[in-house]
Image (spheres, rainbow, N blue to C red):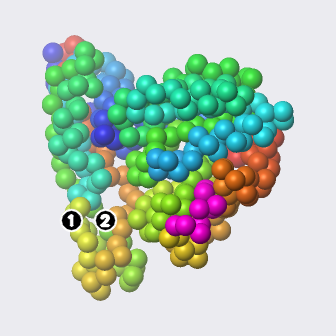
Amino acid sequence: MHELGVVEGIREIALSHARSAGASRILSVRVAIAKSSRYLEDALAMFWDEVCGTSEASGAQIEFVHVPGEWLCLACSKSFAGGREVCRCPECGSQWVKPVDAPECYVESIEVETGAG
Amino acid sequence: MTVKTIHVAQNALNANREIALQNRAALDSAGVVAVNLMASPGAGKTSLIERTIEELKGQIRIGMINSDTSPAVMDAERAERAGAVAVHLNTADRCHLDAGMIRDAIACLPLREIDLLFVENIGNLVCPAAWQLGTHLSVLIASTPEGDDKPYKYPRMYSGAEALVINKIDLLPYVTFNVDYFRRGVEALNQGLRTFALSCRSGAGLIPWFDWIAFLAARETTVLQ
């Protein structure tokens, strides 16, 4: 269920940027998500409509773009790109690997409708 | 009508972090030291809070924000009976607390009448680690019946804590818990982590914990940043 909180965060960020730009409505939100992210895209999408409610984000589409996830091998210290399924270091074969603690899900851009010409 | 694209590039957790900073400012201005207590279900979060309130209520004013995934208010009531001012947060199936919930909860508390605030997070060794609340310190409670492998299985929880409690040490003769193996796992993740081995049930080891909590409550909150 932590995706619910993440989606609320995405909505807040989108609303604050839309309001600063004087937008009347948000048409879409583009979210970049690391392939190694703990957050499940399906679950984020599932909660999206629910959290937008009657705000300016109501009806907005949520789109995902995937960015590579970075992993670190704790055995040989090599870092490598990979997704959630990674369980072995490609260099030394160790299973002692962990995702690098980088932002794994961020709002890349929003598309808005403004009243002014 | 014009359609335009706004470049944002902001971490999805930033919205939570902003609220956490506001919570911290509210706590600081009221002089409240807040401790986020995290653990698996049944590790003894409420028992430790209860024992601490009973011991320290003559010295410091303690508040408690309890959370559970249901309306079950019994833990907040236990804290109240022990002598604290408490509020219950029903997260309605959510697996962790977030900063927005804490903002709502502290609005219900008389902050100026509290020196130390315990925030009892949802019993969970995964999700709470990712969410800043605005508290000053995070304390993780492990308990011996859970087994000695938890630092290896839930590293993020152990690496993010400022102190560790090992509860239920009175059960060590009856459970499989190799203290050295456990400590090696903790040390690899969080070197020199302040650790209290104790039993809320027997009372063993509680004095150093009480002393530390009383010490924290007497600090200027800015020292804890």
Identify the disc placed on residue A85.
1
Q: Farthest front residue?
A: B174
- SS for callout 2: strand
Reply yes or no: does residue B172 show up in magenta: yes
* Residue B69 image point, x, y percent: 40, 33
* Residue B170 image point, x, y percent: 64, 61
Query: Which residue is under mark 2?
Result: A70
Reply yes or no: does residue B184 show up in magenta: no
Which amino acid, by three-letter code, is at mark 1?
Glu
Image quadrant where residue A56 sits? top left
Look at the picture and state if B90 lies above or below A24. Answer: below
Bounds of the magenta span? B167-175
Q: Main secondary structure of the magenta part?
A: helix
Q: Which residue shows up at 58% across the image and 37% down it?
A: B119
Identify the disc placed on residue A110.
none
- SS for callout 1: loop
* Residue B216 image point, x, y percent: 75, 45
* Residue B139 image point, x, y percent: 60, 50
**Badge 1 and badge 2 both on one subunit:** yes
In the displayed structure image, the side of residue B156 where residue B31 appears, left or right:
right
For marks 1 and 2, give the CA distance: 12 Å
Q: Farthest bottom residue?
A: A92
Nearest to viewer (mark 1 / mark 2): 1
* Mark 2 crowdedness (10 Å alpha carbons): few <14, some 14-19, many ≥20: many
In which quadrant will I find the N terminus of chain B? top left
Number of marks in picture = 2
